[in-house]
Image: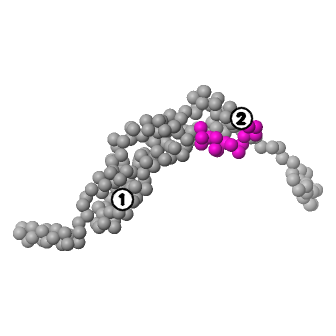
Amino acid sequence: MSASDRPGLSNSPEPSRKPAFQPSLKGRALRLLSQREHTRRELERKLARFEEEPGTLAQALDELQARGFLDERRAAESLAHRRASAYGAARLRQEMQDKGLDRALITQTLAGLQDSEEARARQVWQRRFDAIPVDAKDRARQGRFLLSRGFSGDVVRRVLSIQVLEPEDRELGSECLDDRNSKS
């Protein structure tokens, strides 16, 4: 029995299929917003390929914004909350600008993180290294890592504030320890 003899099977190159259900732009936006907060620019970028008629995406996003589903302030706070444990203010500022957030909103959101900047940098440093730099090369490597994470130079200097001893100073330090141990 060949494929064409069986009921429901044919040799036609394209079987007749019902078109799959395509959610509306608003439905797609709501699905994205249910996963995490998005900015308007992010949704425009992600949904632009599904827009069939010009202006329908903007209209759908306007409606979501009017109903409170799309909120730039919530998106900024959410981003800051999710990423602050791993990144400094400079990196967070850049990410927020890339997502199309207003400069005033970014400044306001990041103002609350300034007090904890050094503590967060120290936590990032401890997770990655947890060892005092033994020489200038190590210190520079650890500093570059923290700078690449968006922490300011002042914060990086404070986190790595333990002075790196020069080789001759290390010898003097070990002699002092030897002297103390021999006296006891």
Q: Is residue 84 above or below residue 160?
A: above
Whether residue 129 is visible to the viewer of this picture, yes or no, is yes
Instruction: Residue at the far right: name it.
Output: 5
Query: Is the stretch drawn in magenta largely helix, strand or loop?
Result: helix
Name which of mark 2 and mark 1 comes first in the sequence. 2
Q: Quadrant of the C terminus?
A: bottom left
Q: For the residue marked with disc 2, what is the amino acid?
A: Gly
Q: Is residue 89 above or below residue 141?
A: above
| Part of the protein shown in magenta | 40-55
Q: Give residue 87's position: percent from left, percent from top.
A: 43, 49
The location of residue 177, given as percent across then percent down, is 13, 68
- Tell me the number on the disc at residue 143: 1
Outermost residue on the top side: it is: 67
Residue 117: give x, y in percent of width and height: 36, 46
Q: Residue at x 55, y 43 (%)?
A: 99
Q: Nearer the viewer, residue 179 or 113?
A: 113
Q: Is residue 174 visible?
A: no
Assess disc 2: are there few (<14), some (14-19) or many (≥20) residues with their C-alpha within 10 Å of its C-alpha: few
Q: Nearer the viewer, residue 43 or 32?
A: 43
- Name the residue: 30% across, 63% down: 133
Give amino acid for label 1. Gly
The label shown at residue 55 is 2
